[in-house]
Amino acid sequence: MAAPLADLDRYTHQALMTGRVSLLGRDVPAGVWFRLLRTLLHEVGLSPSAAGKIGGRVLTLIWETVGQPVRAGMGTWKPYEHMDWPTQETMLHAAAVALQLAADGRITARGVLGAAIQPTTPFRVYDGDRPSPFGTAWPDLTAAAETALDQARAESNGARQLLGLLTMCSHRQETWERQITFLKDVGVAAGFLPDGAELDLQFPASQPATAAARR
């Protein structure tokens, strides 16, 4: 038995034995399978001219693949039940070939049940968010900060360099005083840092405006 016919018989046997059929697109109840099969038998019995331009090409391809004349050589359409057995067998072969061509993507099954006999289209699964570069950089930043603090605790030059880094974006005395307090709190010796006199020289107090200047 040809492979397409064997698949068709397997579907029918599964429908009779289990009440359901596992088609390529989805599982369907036995009643849906028999309705689908009956529709296929009806459609492969149409003439290409009656099926429209696209449908006519599909029917021609099906019968060329079967290796038989279109509509099994019948001059006019007749119900499947009114055909003789050899013609019914040829029609079953054509229906099986139509299923195979749809499964291979060579024809497109249309209608409500069309998707059931074609492989499902795989859905793209989201790959997830990319790892944040900050997540990997944070340990390095933490290690660098600890190294700078250790150096500031050990020598005056390291302490002043770290203070300059912490205050590089500010020219306000209040900011310097706040960062000096912070460094003292984390163990940097006061002698390694500028004192009040040095800050007074760096940030001289502004002179009050004279009465003449205000005029």
Image: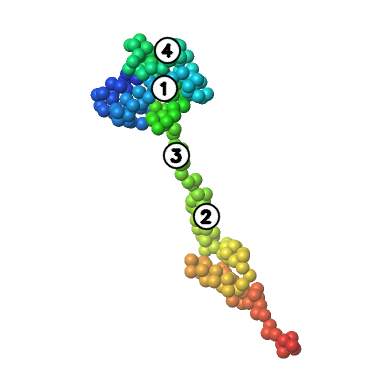
Q: Quadrant of the C terminus?
A: bottom right
Residue under label 4, please give it.
74
Sequence-earlier tag: 1 or 2 = 1
Give whichever of discs 1 and 4 has the lower sequence position. Answer: 1
Mark 1 lies on a secondary structure that is: helix
Q: Is residue 167 above or below residue 64?
A: below
The three-letter code of the residue at mark 2 reads: Leu
Decide if residue 86 is on the left or right side of residue 188.
left
Looking at the picture, tell me which residue is in the foreground, 141 or 185.
141
Mark whose residue sits in front, 2 or 3: 3
Residue topped by disc 2: 141
Looking at marks 3 and 4 on the same chain, the residue that comes earlier in the sequence is marked by 4
Q: Which residue is mark 1?
A: 43
Which residue occupies 46% across, 42% down?
126
Residue position for label 3: 125
- Above or below 166: residue 18: above
Q: Amino acid at mark 3?
A: Val
Q: Mark 4 or 2 closer to N-term?
A: 4
Residue 87, image quadrant: top left
Q: Position of residue 178 (x, y in %)?
A: 54, 71
Element marked by disc 4: loop
Q: How is the image coloured?
A: rainbow
